[in-house]
Amino acid sequence: MAQENITTIVDELLNGFARLLPKNSPEEQRFGIGLLRALARRGPLKADDVAQALDISPVEAKTFLEQSELGRLVLRDKEDRDRILGFWGLATFPTHHQLAINGRTLWANCAGDSLFLPVLLGETARIESKDPENGEVIKLTVSPSGVESVTHENVFVSVNAPEMWDLSSAEKAIGSVCHYIYYFASRASGQRWVAKHPGTVLLPLDAAFDLVYRMNSDERVFGKELARREDESELLQLG
């Protein structure tokens, strides 16, 4: 695949994502990243835990969880709807993609999630996943800046077309998006899998990271909050 084609594919995917992804207010962005980091630190949360972790009132927490566009992507326990198990690609239960962050074991709903979660969490993750075509274990280290190391020389990531996405709930997002985004130990393995799954394309690892980084750092998604936190961090260092 020529580099020009890869660039075109990434741009087309970003344009498709932009039409589907929620346009979050600065407050919603703050709550969203706060919820992700609280889940990563503490595991499953109740609504009252969310209020405490985000330093907001229970009413504000309930409004965010039940009425915001981001709230619909909160994954809840089927037996206890007040218990939050995951959000925005982060899971507190085993999935195909395992993350180790500061001694904590977490999971991601898809390969793409595992690439961008270190950016949103502000922490480095050691990722372990399996090639769904040949079963090979792929291990990566990903920091907020990018991929630091990987066990295989030519890792690829599958992505499906935004036209296939359903983001009306966390469960539907997992079924329509995450079940099509995997790591592959080689181009040949990925090509075999993509050939069996119409509507999917294959991206080199660096292009996949660029795609999800640009998607999440868009100012309509989490870009404003990421920039605010970076500015705060720089001010603290200067102080």
Image (cartoon, rainbow, N blue to C red):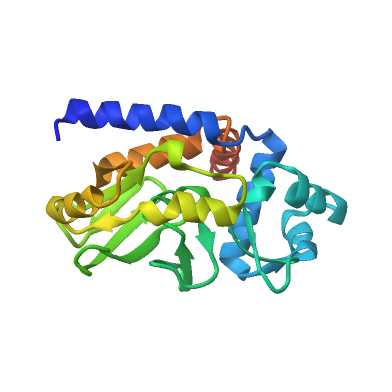
* Residue 56 placement, left or right of 139: right
Q: Quadrant of the C terminus?
A: top right
**Residue at the spot x=37%, y=45% of the render?**
145
Q: In this orientation, which residue lies closer to the viewer: 66 or 235? A: 66
Q: Is residue 14 left or right of residue 40?
A: left
Residue visible at 60% across and 40% down?
A: 232
Quarter of the N terminus within the rendering: top left
Residue 190 seen: yes
- 81 over 110 or under it: above or below: below
Q: Is residue 146 above or below residue 17?
A: below
Residue depicted at 79% across the width and 53% down the height: 61
| Residue 118 in view of the camera | no
Quarter of image, res 27: top right
> Could you tell whether 153 is left or right of 176 in the image?
left
Q: Residue at x 23, y 58 (%)?
A: 150
Residue 68 location, quadrant: top right
Residue 79, percent from left and from top: 70, 74
Count of numbered tags: 0
Residue 155, image x, y percentages: 21, 53
- The image shows residue 105, relative to residue 32, as above or below, that is below
Q: Position of residue 170 (x, y in %)?
A: 59, 54
Q: Describe residue 192's horizontal placement relative to residue 39 as left or right.
A: left
Residue 110 in percent (x, y) is at 41, 56
Figure quadrant of residue 25? top right
Q: Please name whichever residue, 179 or 157, is drawn nearer the observer in this view of the structure.
A: 179
